[in-house]
Image (cartoon, rainbow, N blue to C red):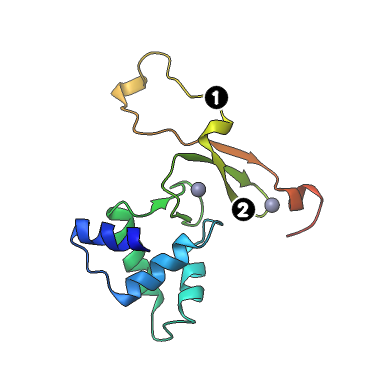
């Protein structure tokens, strides 16, 4: 949380109690939660908070680079407070998103230029499949 306070200061972002609680909920979750799941968690500590407020703060965090959206192509927004380089294992059945360290894959290199003058920023690999629980045939 000291990192969060420091980053807020650097970014000129007010480090309010509300933001601390929301960020803590995000940072303590490795399951790439939806904004709704964060709202459910934060509500225990701040009963008066609204889903709109949670959305607004998540947007602020994302714009400030404190948070990443897992993929713009997923049906629902999934959030990632892990800013280290990593890729994702995505369960196509239960939609679990599991971090996999970059070292688990061979480095990705481009062969020549990308089409249409596209400039690559970073690589994110999504490996689709079934998580252990779904592979065992459980519904969850
Ligand atoms: Zn699964
Ligand atoms: Zn992740």
Q: Which residue is mark 2?
A: 96
Where is residue 12 drawn, in percent x and y?
18, 61
Where is residue 77 drawn, in percent x and y?
46, 56
Which circle marks residue 106 in the picture?
A: 1
Which residue corresponds to the image point at 34% horizontal and 58% vertical from the top-left?
A: 3
* Residue 61 to residue 45: above or below: above
* Residue 35 to residue 71: above or below: below
Spatial CA distance of label 2 from label 1 is 23 Å
The reply to whether the residue tagged 2 has its Cβ within 8 angstroms of ligand 1 is yes
Assign a secondary structure to mark 2.
Answer: loop
Which residue corresponds to the image point at 59% horizontal and 48% vertical from the top-left?
A: 98
Which residue corresponds to the image point at 76% horizontal and 59% vertical from the top-left?
A: 139
* Residue 126 to residue 91: above or below: above
Where is residue 51 drawn, in percent x and y?
41, 74
Answer whether residue 20 is visible to the viewer in this image. Answer: yes
Q: Quadrant of the N terminus?
A: bottom left
Answer whether residue 59 is visible to the viewer in this image. Answer: no
The reply to whether the residue tagged 1 has its Cβ within 8 angstroms of ligand 2 is no
């Amino acid at each position: 949380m000291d990192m969060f306070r420091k980053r807020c200061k650097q970014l000129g972002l007010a480090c309010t109690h509300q933001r601390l609680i929301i960020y803590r909920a995000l940072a303590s979750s490795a399951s790439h939660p939806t904004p709704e799941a964060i709202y459910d968690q934060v509500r225990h500590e701040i009963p008066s908070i609204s889903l709109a407020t949670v959305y607004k703060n998540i947007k602020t965090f994302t714009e400030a680079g404190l948070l990443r959206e897992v993929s713009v192509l997923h049906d629902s927004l999934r959030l990632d407070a892990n800013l280290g380089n990593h890729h994702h294992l995505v369960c196509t059945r239960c939609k679990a998103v599991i971090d996999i360290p970059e070292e688990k894959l061979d480095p990705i290199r481009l062969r020549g230029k990308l089409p249409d003058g596209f400039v690559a920023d970073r690589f994110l690999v999504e490996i689709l499949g079934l998580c252990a629980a779904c592979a065992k045939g459980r519904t969850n």
